[in-house]
Amino acid sequence: MIWKIHPDNPEKRIVQKIVKALNDGEIFILPTDTVYALVCSMDAPRAIAEIYKIKDMPESHHLSILCRDVAKASQYAKSISDPVFRFMKHHTPGPYTFIFSANRNMNRRGTGKRKTVGIRIVDHELIKILLEEFDRPLVASSLTVKDEYFTDPDELDRIYGHRVHAVVSGKIREHNFSTILDCSGDGITLIRQGRGDTAGLDLEEAGDDE
């Protein structure tokens, strides 16, 4: 099932329907500032387990949590260094995934079997409004159509519609992914260069120590 929503001014009636369904433990496919993503409540372990099944991936794989702002992110990261904090303040909301050591506020289902957590502060009006209304993070995993450069919500509905509550249409999206920065160690390691600019960060390339 596809729910159409205005990309810049999401209708309050539809937002409230999404919030209610998320509170009931449902899964949605939502547009983000990069690609579409499977999204559910952080407090819905069955839905999180189902996302792993839909993606056909082990629980050791990273899931992201969508946070409203840096202050909310700091409630789930064990520590955020001053350089990373300054970068996040100036570059988010935006197309970045920050990996941190998880603190005790993260349960096992929210992080998989890993001790780290990937945090996104998404620059998309629907996600920002949902996080204000929901008042707690959402769990997300990116979703694209295999072997394509663009993702059409109609195609997502055809493939996954029977396994989610609804696909919320954000139009066709190009496969531009987030930049992934691992901030869980002493330095900052670039895991993947995506849409997000990393100028101003003292980065270590992944694999430099090998």
Image (spheres, helix red, strand yellow):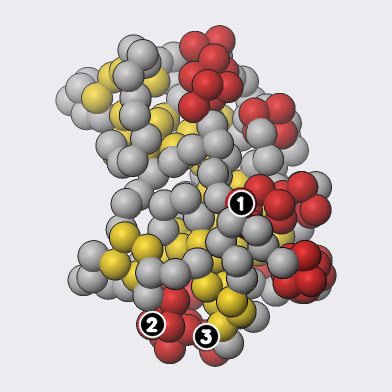
Q: Position of residue 164 (x, y in %)?
A: 59, 80
| x 80%, y 53%: residue | 133
Decide which of 199, 80 is in the foreground and name it: 199
Q: Position of residue 90 (x, y in %)?
A: 52, 21
| x 45%, y 21%: residue | 185
Mark 3 — residue? 161
Q: Nearer the viewer, mark 1 or mark 2?
A: 1
| x 71%, y 27%: residue | 71
| Left or right placement of residue 19 versus residue 81 in this view | right
**Which picture quadrant has residue 95?**
top left
Compared with residue 36, is residue 108 higher up or lower down, i.e. above or below? above
Compared with residue 22, is residue 208 higher up or lower down, i.e. above or below? above
Mark 1 — residue? 125
| x 67%, y 62%: residue | 10
How far apart in space, not on screen, are marks 1 and 3 (Cα)?
Answer: 23 Å
Compared with residue 45, is residue 33 higher up or lower down, i.e. above or below? above
Mark 2 — residue? 155
- Circle 2: is it few (<14), some (14-19), or many (20+) Cα within 10 Å? few
Q: Nearer the viewer, mark 1 or mark 3?
A: 1
Please state, as top left, top right, bottom left or bottom right, where the C terminus lies in the image. top left
Pointers 2 and 3 in contact (CB under 8 A)? no
Pointers 1 and 2 in contact (CB under 8 A)? no
SS category of the residue bearing label 2: helix
SS category of the residue bearing label 3: helix
